[in-house]
Amino acid sequence: MIKRYVTFAVLAAWLGGSVPVRGDIEARRNFEAIASQLDPGGELFLVLQAGRWIDRLLQTLAGEQAGALDPDAQVPREALEQTRRFLNRMGVGAWRGVGVSSSSSRGAAHAVKLFLLRDAVDSSLPFWRGLFGWQPRRLMSLDFVPAGFAMVRAGTLEPKTLWDMLAEGAREAGGPAAQTRFDQRRADLTVQLGIAPDDLLASLRDEMLLAVRFAQEATFTLPVANGDLTLPVPAFLLVVATGEDVLRGVIEAQLAHRKIPLTESVVAGITMRQAEKELEGLPFPLQPALASAPGFLLLGSTPAVVEEALLAYRHRNGLVTRPDFVAAFQGLPMVNNGILYVDEVAARVLKHWQVSRFEGRHAGEESDSPAMTRLTTALATGGTGLPTCALVVRNWKNGVMINGNSGIGGEALMHATGAAAQTLWNALWQREELPKKGDTF
C-alpha cells in the first residue's frame, strides 16, 4: 500500500507544478541559470524548474497538500523529517532543475545538451560525488579500449561513497527494519565475497569503463515473446581503477570456488590469467580473462580482448586514436567526468533489440489499423534514426552538464518520452485495476 502511494505521490509532486518557497525571484534565477547553458533556436528547448522539490514531495507524502491521493497512507511526520535531513545532507535536495536542448548539427547529427542545476555549495556532497566523481580529468581507462569496439561508457564515480550513502540511509531514514535488512545483506555479501563489501569498495579508485564489441558474422539467439531474437556475438571489456589488487583476488577466488581452472600468459610484460576453456551453458562464448595494469584491473570476456587491451595501452593505438572516434568527439572536451560513445554498428544492434522488445511486448494484441501499429512502434523506438552518440559528462560546481552529438534529435526524443509516459501510466492504471486479495466481484 505504501509503495503504491509513494509512486503516486512522486507523480503528484511533479505534476503539481513548482511552488517556489522563496518566491518568483528564485524560480526566475534558476530558469536563467539553466537556460544560459542550453542552445536556443533548435528543435527542442525545455526547462523544468524543480524548486524545493523535496519539500513538496514530503508534504504530499504527509497528506498536507490538497488532493492527497490516499489519506490512510500518510507517513509519520518524524520519519519524513528524518528523510528530509538525510536527503539534504547527502546532496539530493540540492537539485534545482533540469534543461535539455537539441539542434541540427553537422551531417545527420544533432547537438544535444542536458544540464542539471544544483546548489554550488553542495557540489561535493556524497550523492553527486558518488555518481559523477569530482574534478574533471582525462580518463586514462580509455587508452585500454582496442580499435573496433562499438560502444564505450567510461566515467568517474565513487563506489564506496555510494555504498556509505546507502548504509547511512538505512540507518538514519529507513528505520529498524531497513537497518536489519541492510546489515543482513552486508553479512551475506561478506560470506559470498570472502571480504566485507566496505573493504572491497574502499580498494577501488574513482574511474570505471565498460566497452562492447560486436562480431561481424557470428550470431546468437535470445528467446523473446514473438520468437527468437538474433544478435551479433558481443565481447566485453571492463576496466576498473584500483589502488590495490583486492578486486582481482576476489574474482580469482570466485572462479576457484566454481572450480574454473586458470592458466597464465604474459602480454606486453604483464601477466594475464584466463579460464582454461570457455564456460558452458551460455548463449555466446565466454572465457573470462583478467590482468593488472598500472593502476587498473582489466576483465575481458575472452583472453583475446584483454590481450588487445594491453597492447592498445602499450602502443597507444587503441580506439581513441582512430579517425571515427576522433571525428565523433571533435570540439568536445576530453577533460571530463565521463563519456558515452555509440557508433553505427552498436546503434543498429540497439535499434534492432529495442524494436524487437517493443514488438514482443505487444505480440498478440489485436489492431484495427496496421498503419497505427507501425506509427506507435516508430514513436516508441525513435523513428528511423539510429541512436548513435558521442557525449561527454562534466561535473561543475553549479551542476552537471551532458552534451555532445546524437543521431536522435529532439523530436524523436519527445516522441519516445511520450510513449514511455503512456506505457508508465498504463502500467500504473492496470496495477490499480488488478483485483486485490480479499476483493470480490
Image: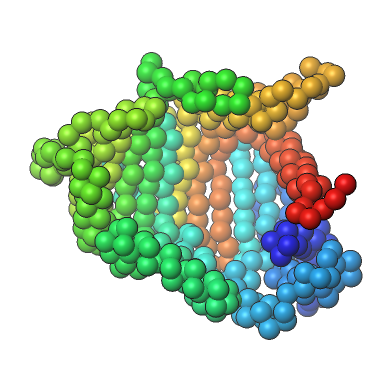
Total numbered circles: 0
Query: Residue drawn 63% across and 33% down?
Result: 408
Q: Is residue 153 above or below residue 136?
A: above
User: Dividing the picture into quarters, in which one does residue 7 lie?
Assistant: bottom right
Q: Where's residue 6, x and y in %? A: 72, 63
Residue 236 in sight: yes
Q: Is residue 424 above or below residue 6?
A: above
202 or 308: which is nearer to us?
202
Residue 322 in sight: no
Q: Quick check: 63 left or right of 360?
A: right
User: Dividing the picture into quarters, in which one does residue 384 lie?
Assistant: top right
Q: Where's residue 412, x and y in %? A: 70, 34
Q: Where's residue 112, x and y in %? A: 61, 43
Query: Residue drawn 32% across and 28% down?
Result: 285
Query: Residue drawn 37% across and 22% down?
Result: 215
Q: Is residue 213 above or below residue 19?
A: above
Query: Residue drawn 35% across and 36% down?
Result: 236
Q: Where's residue 167, x and y in %? A: 47, 72
Q: Quick check: 74 left or right of 243?
A: right
- Quadrant assignment for the N terminus: bottom right
439 or 243: which is nearer to us?
439
Q: Quick check: 77 left or right of 165?
A: right
- Please name the colour scheme applied to the rendered image: rainbow
